[in-house]
């Protein structure tokens, strides 16, 4: 059997973007002397994923994509299943709402061809397309770096080599297996943060790949992001138990939930009185902090109905 240079794993989540567009984009990947497979893992998170895949195969019989159905739920379990089913020594995890540009797979493969040893992750950026950046919340979330942990538009100037996320990342199968893969119990949030901490403790680092761009086809809303952060807050305790104190979460340990609720209410009032960019951003930040704090202190998702109708 001819060796495969890369196994791309795409874990399906309950997103509403055009899955057909994502699948079709892998057919258009460029790269001389490069072979790859794409394993789309369906744990039941997408309606009609099998129909979309069958239609894709009819249009592109030579597609590198195969569909893997599993019983488990959650991104972590799906990515782990895809890794187990892979045929390459190089794994590339890409979000199901990420549309890969034609050079994405090649950029990851070329990095690892030049890495002789060590635990190294290749990180590709993702950007909202212009039509989605028109929303002020999404624009702020991306440019601030709070969406994924780094502001990708500034990454070429300063790259934090400890950064890791599961949206657009390549890593050797050997390193992935040695570190135990993603933690299934973390489901869809925190699984990549936890893995990144383990990679760092193992002496690993990440490299920024500016040519591995993906377009983030997700009309993300404030209520949706708040729900995700509540789940993150709930699962933060599992990560702290494993890794110890996390600097980014120190204030959630130090302050009571009431303080976050009061700050969010104050920000709402200030924005209502003077609806400008400064008060709008303060409102966004305080509501997301409150959502994480609610999860951290044991209040589940969808707890704050006031976020459901943002004033913008």
Image (cartoon, rainbow, N blue to C red):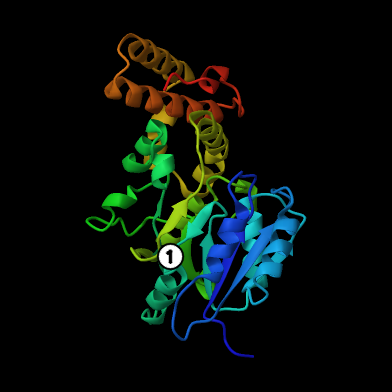
**Apparent side of residue 279 relative to residue 53 in the rendered image (left or right):** left
Q: Is residue 80 visible?
A: yes
Q: Tell me the quarter of the picture where residue 52 sits.
A: bottom right
Residue 216: horizontal and vertical position, in percent? 47, 50
Q: Nearer the viewer, residue 139 or 251?
A: 139
Is 103 located above or below residue 131 in the figure? Answer: below
Q: Is residue 176 visible?
A: no
**Apparent side of residue 216 relative to residue 267 in the rendered image (left or right):** right
Q: Residue furthest right?
A: 71
Residue 86: horizontal and vertical position, in percent? 63, 73
- What residue appears at the point 45 percent right and 29 percent down from the top-left corner? 288
Q: Quadrant of the C terminus?
A: top left
Q: Nearer the viewer, residue 149 or 209?
A: 209
Q: Secondary structure at mark 1?
A: loop
Is 65 located above or below residue 255 in the figure? Answer: below
Per the image, the residue denoted by label 1 is 202
Q: Quadrant of the N terminus?
A: bottom right
Dot 1 crowding, Cα within 10 Å, few <14, some 14–19, many 20+: some
Q: Residue furthest bottom?
A: 1
- What residue appears at the point 65 percent right and 49 percent down from the top-left corner? 74
Q: Residue furthest front?
A: 59
Q: Nearer the viewer, residue 53 or 258?
A: 53
**Apparent side of residue 13 relative to residue 126 in the rendered image (left or right):** right
- What residue appears at the point 38 percent right and 30 percent down from the top-left corner? 251
Q: Nearer the viewer, residue 307 or 240?
A: 307
Residue 135: horizontal and vertical position, in percent? 41, 33
Is 90 located above or below residue 220 in the figure? Answer: below
Residue 181: horizontal and vertical position, in percent? 58, 62
């Amino acid at each position: 059997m001819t060796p495969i240079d890369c196994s791309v794993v795409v874990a399906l989540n309950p997103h509403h973007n055009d899955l057909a567009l994502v699948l079709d984009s892998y057919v258009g990947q460029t790269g001389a002397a490069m072979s790859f497979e794409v394993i789309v893992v369906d744990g039941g998170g997408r309606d009609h994923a099998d129909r979309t895949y069958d239609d894709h195969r009819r249009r592109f019989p030579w597609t590198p994509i195969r569909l893997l159905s599993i019983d488990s739920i959650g991104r972590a379990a799906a990515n782990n299943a895809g890794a187990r089913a892979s045929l390459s020594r190089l794994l590339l995890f890409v979000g199901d709402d990420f549309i890969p540009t034609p050079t994405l797979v090649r950029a990851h493969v070329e990095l690892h061809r030049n890495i002789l040893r060590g635990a190294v992750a290749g990180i590709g950026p993702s950007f909202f397309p212009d039509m989605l950046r028109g929303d002020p919340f999404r624009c702020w979330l991306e440019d601030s770096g709070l969406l994924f942990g780094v502001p990708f538009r500034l990454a070429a100037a300063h790259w934090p080599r400890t950064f890791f996320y599961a949206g657009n990342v390549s890593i050797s199968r050997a390193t992935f297996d040695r570190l135990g893969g993603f933690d299934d119990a973390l489901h869809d949030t925190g699984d990549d943060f936890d893995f990144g901490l383990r990679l760092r403790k193992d002496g690993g680092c990440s490299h920024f790949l500016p040519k591995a761009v993906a377009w983030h086809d997700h009309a993300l809303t404030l209520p949706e992001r708040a729900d995700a952060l509540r789940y993150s807050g709930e699962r933060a305790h599992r990560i702290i138990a494993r890794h110890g104190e996390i600097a980014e979460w120190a204030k959630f340990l130090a302050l009571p939930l009431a303080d976050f609720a009061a700050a969010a209410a104050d920000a709402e009032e200030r924005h209502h009185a003077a609806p400008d960019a400064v008060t709008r951003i303060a409102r966004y930040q305080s509501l997301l902090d409150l959502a994480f704090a609610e999860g951290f202190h044991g209040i589940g998702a969808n707890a704050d109905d006031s976020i459901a109708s943002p004033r913008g």
